[in-house]
Amino acid sequence: MSTTEGSKRLGGISDAFSDRNFRIYSVGSIGSWISFFVQIVTVSWLTWELTGSTKWLAIMALLDIVPNVVLMPIAGAISDRFDRHKIMLVTSILLFLQAALLALVAWADMLTIWTLAVLVLMHGIFISLMVPAMYGIIPRFVGRAVMPSAIAVASAYSQLALFVGPALAGWIIAEHGTTVAFVVNALGYLLLICAFLRMRTPADYVPPERSTRSFVGDIWDGAIYIFERKTIWSLLLIMLVADAVALGFIHMLPAYADTVLGLGVVGMTTILAMRGLGAICAALRLAYLGAPAARVNSVLWAFLAALLALGVLVQTRNLYLAAGIAVVMGFAGETKNTGIMTIIQLAVDENQRGRVMGTAFMFSQLAAGIGAYLIGAFSVEAGVQLPTTVAVCVGLGFWGFIFLQRKKLFQDRF
């Protein structure tokens, strides 16, 4: 088979990897994403071990999330004013230092729930400064013609990590302890820093004109820009509700794995890994199909499928059945998420990209915080299953409303 024939078979995936910057970015991104999920799982499980409390699971989630909600508008404005490549470098270094400190404190056996909470809060602050620039890094280094495929392939990295990271975390925690898991996270950020140092600005890159307004003015302009574009704010609203339901449950997964499946960290990491496997398949499918796959109809049906899958999953007490449902949930959820992000990325103006994509991430984090808090609070008395089922029913009602209004809200995006 010739190289040309192989490229045709791979569709948009081969287009993305034809770009040198994207290949370098891929190495750092995969490594950092895997280590990121190792830390997320380790922190979640350690919180459960230290406290045995769903309230603390919710609190720890909020400490990581609240900075993203509070600081994201400012971070979005910064991303639209300054070089996103340099922002990514600085924030990656800060995250490496935070991860190294977490590993050091764990090694010194000084890690209490309060120490962990402070370090998780630091992580949330640094991530909030990174994310708007992160969403703009592919458009900064990759041509528009291959951007939809590059976005989908890059999304597959996070889902590959969601598949590999929890499984790796479970093995590391069981065999080597939490300290080694935190060291792995620090090494992941070190790899990302090296990748960013190797990337080069394309010759035809034209930086957006820097705003001369105040930060408050920039934030206000971004809000008006989103509000005036019905498709963008409607998709953001879908993201808000969908993530409140799905991520709210994910933050309670240690409790579900322990009290419903009765399998502890093995059950938790298995569900996360299978969800990640389904998401990988969805992201690679979207990468192969490219821009034509980014349609609102696909987003809406995937949203429905993800809700139904979660509704069945939370009632399941058999690990094998739960793992199979988690694959479906991951595939549907990633189809929805990548579809939303691709539509928005292609629709947004370059000088508004940081603020719009920062708002998208802020909505996702706000939703996760709301979902984690509500499901976690009600789970104290009622268990995980009932609050999650109620959340799924609310999501289904919202889906029905959006589906009936879809032609008014989205118009030409079908």
Image (tube, rainbow, N blue to C red):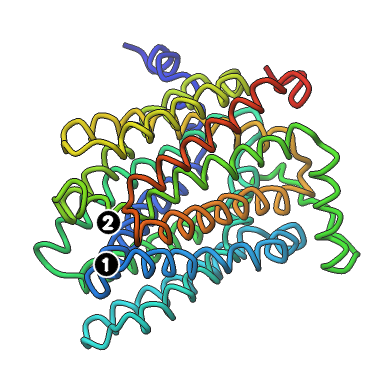
Residue in front for this viewpoint, 93 or 265:
265
What residue sits 52% from the left and 47% below the top?
Answer: 244
Is residue 378 toward the left or the right of residue 183 in the image? right
Callout 1 touching callout 2 (CB < 8 Å): yes
| Image quarter hosting the C terminus | top right
Q: Position of residue 182 (x, y in %)?
A: 28, 70
Quick one: label 1 or label 2, which is nearer the N terminus?
1
Residue 147 visible in the current orientation: no
Residue 65 visible in the current orientation: yes
Q: Position of residue 29 (x, y in %)?
A: 43, 51
The residue under label 2 is 254
Q: Position of residue 393 (x, y in %)?
A: 49, 35
What is the secondary structure assignment of the residue under circle 1? helix
- Which picture quadrant has residue 178? bottom left
Say if 256 sits above or below 66 in the image: above
Of all residues shown, which one is farthest toward the left?
175
The residue under label 1 is 48
